[in-house]
Amino acid sequence: NAISEPTIFESLESEVRSYCRDWPTVFSTAQGSWIRDENGNEYLDFFAGAGALNYGHNNPVLKQALVDYIVSDGITHGLDMSTVAKREFLETFKQRILDPRGLDYKVQFPGPTGSNTVEAALKLARKVTGRESIINFTNAFHGMTLGALSVTGNSMKRAGAGIPLVHATPMPFDNYFDGTMEDFHWFERLLDDSGSGLNHPAAVIVETVQGEGGVNVARAEWLRALADLCSRREILLIVDDVQMGCGRTGPFFSFEIAGITPDIVTLSKSISGYGMPMALTLMKPELDIWGPGEHNGTFRGFNPGFVTSKAALDHYWSDDALHLSTMAKGEKVHESFAGLAAAFDGVSTRGRGLVQGLVFEKADLASKVCQHSFEAGLLTETSGPSDEVVKLLPPLTITDDELDHGLRIIADATAKVCG
Ligand code: PMP
């Protein structure tokens, strides 16, 4: 793979944004697990639109549904009016996803992005409870708008925004203290103690696996204890499934592993399935106290997104084949990473399903592995507070051969930087 001149790339990037992912090339087309640049180089994509492409690039089933819809002059704009595409999506979502899991949620379209659904969830929790403060977790990531940023546990990301808009108190995520504060007794004590300064919160917002925070995996029993605490204390539980939902960890909803039913669920990224902007806020029916026009916006019912989303649900979620293959592929990645952890000092691994992290004690090594991987034709990204984790988010539809190919590149890159 020849890499185009970084200087040309940087000047192009700097005109549109000041943020670059260290992939010094200009991409043009993509299919399945592969993305191509304008010079004809091909890269295997273990980044998959930051988790927005669980079914791969230009998935043929979804593409056909989209093409048919456009050719038939289906409505394309995004205002939240009733349309056939919307109705069919909602019916399919209920039939394929909610009903089989015994879940009863009202569905809101809060706007196009993950941050939009987090904002809606926080606003709703505050309106329903009449309380203001939110509990979030160390290393959480919930988005870059002011409300979502307030519950994001990363001081660097918050620093530019000044005072948090939402009063949020961070609690330690599972295993933050290496297993020493596993239950929530200390938290309940703070809630009961009028001298602690902790207000009765409206909600707790949690990711079951923290993606941006470094692939930190909450155990099922920890999630159950959290859900139990919330229900006893009448605190609403929001599970942010923007990145881990839509099958990334195996089941459609990442919280299914714990057998819990959150009060509010946020979904985005892979819900349209085609990399197109779409977000949902799911709420228990009794929580739907929005007044007309209280949370609206122009681009919150994107009809082409409904069409591709319905096609994805019909094709991939009518049985458990995708769930099972995701678990099997996750195991394959885990075995490969566990081998690297055994072979090299200061390397470890963690993950669930097809979100897997290779963790480096020396933070800059993770970036070097990503850089070597790019040069060998593989896209990966880092995550974690010091970018110390190589995070893998391949399409769930990746083949075993493609997965093996990418894992070999990462193994070679790790040997290069650690050897
Ligand atoms: N919540 C989680 C868990 C996320 O991972 C992200 C995006 N990385 C967001 C919210 C924000 O989504 P968006 O970037 O689409 O606003």
Image (cartoon, rainbow, N blue to C red):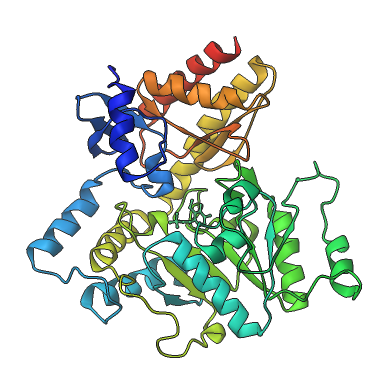
- The quarter of the rendered structure image containing the C terminus is top right
Image coordinates for residue 268, horizontal then vertical, percent: 42, 60
Image coordinates for residue 310, horizontal then vertical, percent: 29, 64
Q: In the rendered image of this protein, does residue 48 appear above or below residue 4?
A: below
Picture quarter containing residue 161? bottom right
Q: In the rendered image of this protein, does residue 80 appear above or below residue 185?
A: below
Q: Residue at x 24, y 31 (%)?
A: 36
Image coordinates for residue 330, horizontal then vertical, percent: 51, 37
**Position of residue 84 in the picture relative to residue 147 (left or right):** left
**Position of residue 246 in the picture relative to residue 187 (left or right):** left
Extreme residue in the bottom direction:
291
**Position of residue 408 in the picture relative to residue 347 (left or right):** left
Tally of numbered discs: 0
Extreme residue in the top direction:
419
**Position of residue 129 in the picture relative to residue 141 (left or right):** right
- The quarter of the rendered structure image containing the N terminus is top left
User: Who is closer to the viewer here, 183 or 14?
Assistant: 14
Q: In the rendered image of this protein, does residue 280 appear above or below residue 128?
A: above
Q: In the rendered image of this protein, does residue 294 appear above or below residue 211?
A: below
Image coordinates for residue 314, horizontal then vertical, percent: 31, 60
